[in-house]
Amino acid sequence: MQAFISAQGLVKHYGNTLALDNVSFEVYQNEILGFIGPDGAGKSTLFEILTTLLIPDAGEASINGMDIHKDYGKIRASIGFMPGKFSLYQDLTVQENLSFFANIFGSSIEENYHLIKGIYELLKPFANRKAGALSGGMKQKLALCCALIHKPLALFLDEPTTGVDAVSRTEFWDNLMQIRDSGIPIVVSTPYMDEATRCDRVAMIHNGRIMKLDTPDNIIKGYDGKLLSITCKDRQKPKALLQNEAAITSLYSFGDALHISLNNTDASTLKLISSKLEQGMDSPYQIKEVFPIFEDCFLQLMGQMKK
Amino acid sequence: MSDVIIQASNLSRRFGNFVAVDNITFEVRSGEIFGFLGANGAGKTTAMRILCGLLAPSSGSATVCGYDVATQSEQVKLNIGYMSQRFSLFDDLSVWDNISFYAGIYKMSRAQIKDAGNTMLDKLELSKYKNRLVGSLPLGWKQKLAFAIAIIHKPQLVFLDEPTGGVDPITRRAFWDMLYAAAIEGITIFVTTHYLDEAEYCDRISIMVNGKIGALGTPLELKEQFKVLSIYDVILALARGEEA
Amino acid sequence: MKNLSIFVRKEFLHIVRDPKSLMIMVLLPLVEIMLIGFVLRFEIANTNLAVVDMAKQQQSTKLIHRLEGGDRFKVRLTQSMPEAEELLTEGKVKAILYISEDFDRKAVENSESSLQLLLDATDPNIATTIEAYVKATLADFWVDSIGGSPVPMLITEQMFYYNPLLKSVYATVPGLISVVLMLICALMTSISLTREKESGTLKVLLISPLKPLQIIIGKLAPYLLVSLLITGIILALSFGVFGVPMAGSLIMLIMVSFVYCLCALALGFLISTKAKTQQVAMMMSLAGLMLPTTLLSGMIYPIKNMPLWLQGITYIMPARWFVSILKHIMLKASPFSAYAGELVVLLIMTGIFTLLSLKNFTTRFR
């Protein structure tokens, strides 16, 4: 299958800081590719290069055969972009924002209403409210509608869910799935690890490098070693007890549990750990093997990268 | 009653016809990590501003550290620490200038500032970077520095408004370790967050829905109460209940 | 073209949605012209003038009557110079006119006259004005009473020729127009362009079929219209309230204002390509444009009185050329050829600023 978007060896420096370090990837039609990583990982730089706002120091990229250097005018006229902050006109109403962004692309709300229908229905009661007076989740939906209303060839969404509450985030991802199913490929970035599972493929990005790019399933399957989860009342206790155990490669809090990573789970290692806990714990606890979640994988890769 | 540090009673705040905070009553106990959750626009920020003494309540009352937020807001402000989403550090000042500026605001003497400041930098392992401009520090360091500065005057209580937005998972955990250490020293932590795994790290959490407190308890209690497996599902159940 | 109209419509919505800024844009020129018109006036009425008439003859008496007529002077006749000087020291009079014994004879002979004017120069502005008044009165007197051409000493300065009543409003209105237009065109556009930058909407606009030039014209055009409207308000006020004459062609005036507005818009645009935030844009516009325009356009301080290096700087101020053209049109009704040179300078400046800002307007960043 022919890639819809492809990037080869993208490099970008800001002064002495390396913001993007030899980044290559491909995006196919009908897929959502997510870039997951913390602030400062290079996500926004990458998005600005793909949308032709920023010129890379080295590397090539193309969207539907259009080169980011030669055909940047064509690319700009045909993609949809939602930059980091929801870039709306706060002093214009919901309706005015939407029709402005439709009109500058020579389109109209009516023409492509079917694309945004699912999202816009929720916004409709507020059509005459100023964008500045909307809640975060509503602003985010409006910004998505604005990026979508001209029927773009591809959507580029830079951290569309940052600072938005958990429920709105879930709804937003449901919307993205619908858009993808209508045939528009989506490149999206997020600092929230839990959103990785909603993407078709995920690129984990840190310090300007793609640490891993694969489907969420494969990334989780690729987790190196086994994972035990300990739940108890005082989370700090098992942490202190097991801190210096040689068999344990890492030890991180996860919600109400403590995740410990082991290279192997043979009987002797398990016994060692349980005896340690048995001696040290003064309140009841539970220990069980669990499947890693995405954040476990990210932590592991970050650890490997440091070495 | 000495172990109650925040006591809100029938607290309300209206903006015109809009009720941002709707008759909420709750208490925060001394020394606990209290998670303050809720969707955007649910009234979290307004409630927090009232408790910090920045905004007068329309009705009801609240005491923070034993002072009334409406009539003794100056004493309230002296006894609390505050750290915002954007860290409120001055990027164009050095690490030390930031420390001495904020410590100075809380009326600490020169000797006290020197003492507390150096101890703090040793703990953070930032002593070498005393004269570096804050703007040149990595995000994770800035975040730790901002928190240490927010508690430099040894407040009884510290308010943290989404302190971990955007930082990587390792730094985020290191930050929570700092919060635990502060809690063990006896500082009460009042924190808002959008990361739901962080909600589980709190001793007790409250979830605001449309200006009211929709649920309050330990993470375990809430999950049992709503018969679900995660805090996310608790929030979802609350949101659905509101729509219905 | 359709894209452009969409854009202009949006920009007008911004202007209308922000009534405070709109009020400032409209009220500012009104307040400023009122202040300058009523407060900052250099003409003086009822100046106390001591006259020492040693001649006491027909012509000298006529001259004194002449000075007393009108509301410019209050004449106090004194018997001797010492007496008059005492009044001057005490501040009871602002000037002394000494008429010597041979005034009549010399006047008839039409030879050099024997008048002496002593001025209290503690306030040089007032002193110069009084001097000018006396000279003007003498000139009239000479023509009417003696019938000859004025003797060399009494040549009146050309500057007062077009403003015979020495109304300072006449001189300040053109300056005022230049300041207000600079404020609205440059300040407002630089702020509105940096606002798009700050909010991130500029990125969205760049990633669209809009051409950079369309974005720029779309942003600037509404402010051009607002500026022309405000020029109209200022002119109406100047004619209506202060009776400033409109000697030349109104159409020419509007066309020249249009060119000046373009120049100011280009400057505002140039500022916005350099400024990252609205605050910086505002500071740059106020400190870099407003202040120099007010001080160096010749509106308040005559350019001739400035040190040479400062006079040099006035040559790069668009306002200097604009004010000069306005004076030609409004006060003198000069033919086009008289100010064609200034207009060319203004056009060249506009072209340079536009090219510079287009060069600095990055649509792809490095």
Image: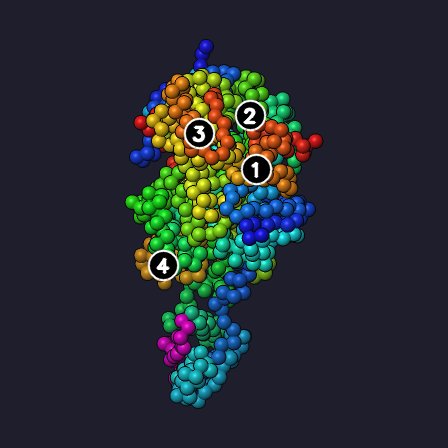
Left/right of residue A240 with respect to residue A79 in the rendered view: left
Q: CA distance from mark 2 to mark 1?
A: 29 Å
Residue at image position (41%, 51%) is B152
For label 1, the SS is: loop
Badge 4 density bin: few <14, some 14–19, many ≥20, Cα 10 Å: few
Q: Which residue is mark 4?
A: B110
Identify which amino acid the numbered label 2 is placed on: Trp
For label 2, the SS is: helix
Q: Nearer the viewer, residue C236 or B188?
A: B188
Q: Are marks 1 and 3 in contact (CB under 8 Å)?
A: no
Query: Of callouts 2 and 3, which one flags the residue occurring earlier in the amino acid sequence?
Result: 2
Subunit ID for the residue under disc 2: A
**Labels 2 and 1 positioned on one and the same chain:** no
Of the two numbered discs 1 and 4 in the rendering, the one whose residue sits closer to the viewer:
1
Q: CA distance from mark 2 to mark 4?
A: 53 Å
Identify which amino acid the numbered label 3 is placed on: Glu
Span highlighted in magenta in the image: C102-124
Q: Which mark is residue B218?
A: 1
Of the two numbered discs 1 and 3 in the rendering, the one whose residue sits closer to the viewer:
3
Q: Which residue is mark 2?
A: A173
Query: Of callouts 1 and 4, which one flags the residue occurring earlier in the amino acid sequence?
Result: 4
Q: Nearer the viewer, residue A251 or A213?
A: A251
Subunit ID for the residue under disc 3: A
Identify which amino acid the numbered label 1 is placed on: Thr
Q: Is residue C135 visible?
A: no
Residue B188 is a magenta residue: no
For label 4, the SS is: helix
Residue at image position (47%, 53%) is C179
Q: CA distance from mark 2 to mark 3?
A: 44 Å
Residue B45 falls in image quadrant: top right
